[in-house]
Amino acid sequence: MIQLQNLYFRYHPKRPLFEGLHFQIDKPGIIGLLGSNGAGKTTLLHLLAGLRFPWAGTCTVLGAEPRNRQLSWQQQVLFVPETIEMPARTLQRWLAELAPFYPRFDQRLFDAIVKEFELEVSGKLSELSFGQQKKVMLAFALATQVKVLLLDEPSNGLDIFSKSQLRRIWTRHLPDDTLVVISTHQVRELGAQFDQVMMIDQGKLLFHQFSMISL
């Protein structure tokens, strides 16, 4: 599903971020992407989403290069950033504009997740609190049922109870054929959800292994 071979990336010619990064993920599940601040977790998600491009090497997701961002590919890959800024639209209008882009979007699933989050959405989405906006976006992301879901710090902005809700929602509603890559510092809160764990540091993959919890 995801393959990186000898990948190089840098923001500055004299300060490389990734040098010869290599890994492969073949099966669906939840991958925890760990590392210190500045290790490149968000940049790696951007590369997988086609929002940044490798300097050298190859990066393929679902058999295609993300940088090409083909329409059929974009319909199967979704990136949710850490910071969410929803538009000044009602939920109904926002869904009507965005949901048709994703062929497997399930309105009933979206409604069920919103209910589990105990959300009552009225007025414009931009008027919601940051935590509420995050819940709406996470509900939408799961309801798209894309094949690859990339989440950057998904629990940031959620209170303790909402983080517990999110863990239960993943358990109940994540499609069996979806690969989720989660960049996070919240290992204690989300670690039990991980099927595999990856850690990057100084442009290198320190380890990539199955989570002990999943064995």
Image (cartoon, helix red, strand yellow):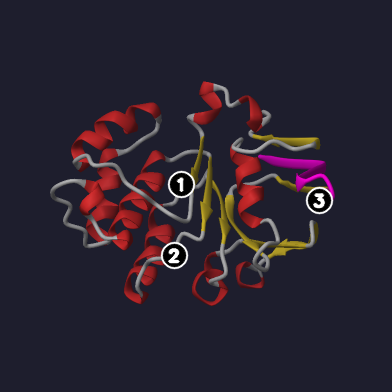
Picture quadrant of residue 99 = top left
Mark 2 to mark 3 CA distance (whole Å): 29 Å
Indicate the position of residue 69 as horizontal and vertical percent values.
Answer: 58, 26
**Residue located 64% across and 56% down the image:** 41
Name the kind of residue labelled 2 in the image.
Ser
Quarter holding the N terminus is top right
Residue type indicated by callout 1: Pro
Which residue occupies the foreground of this view, 41 or 110?
41
Left or right, residue 99 beside residue 15: left
Q: Which residue matches tag 3? A: 16
Specify the amino acid type for callout 3.
Answer: Pro
The reply to whether callout 1 and callout 2 are in contact (CB within 8 Å) is no
**Quadrant assignment for the C terminus:** bottom right
Q: Check disc 3 and report its element: helix, strand or loop.
A: strand
Residue placed at 51% from the left, 52% from the top? Answer: 151
Q: Is residue 188 above or below residue 111?
A: below
State the extent of the magenta-drawn residues as a range. Answer: 1-19
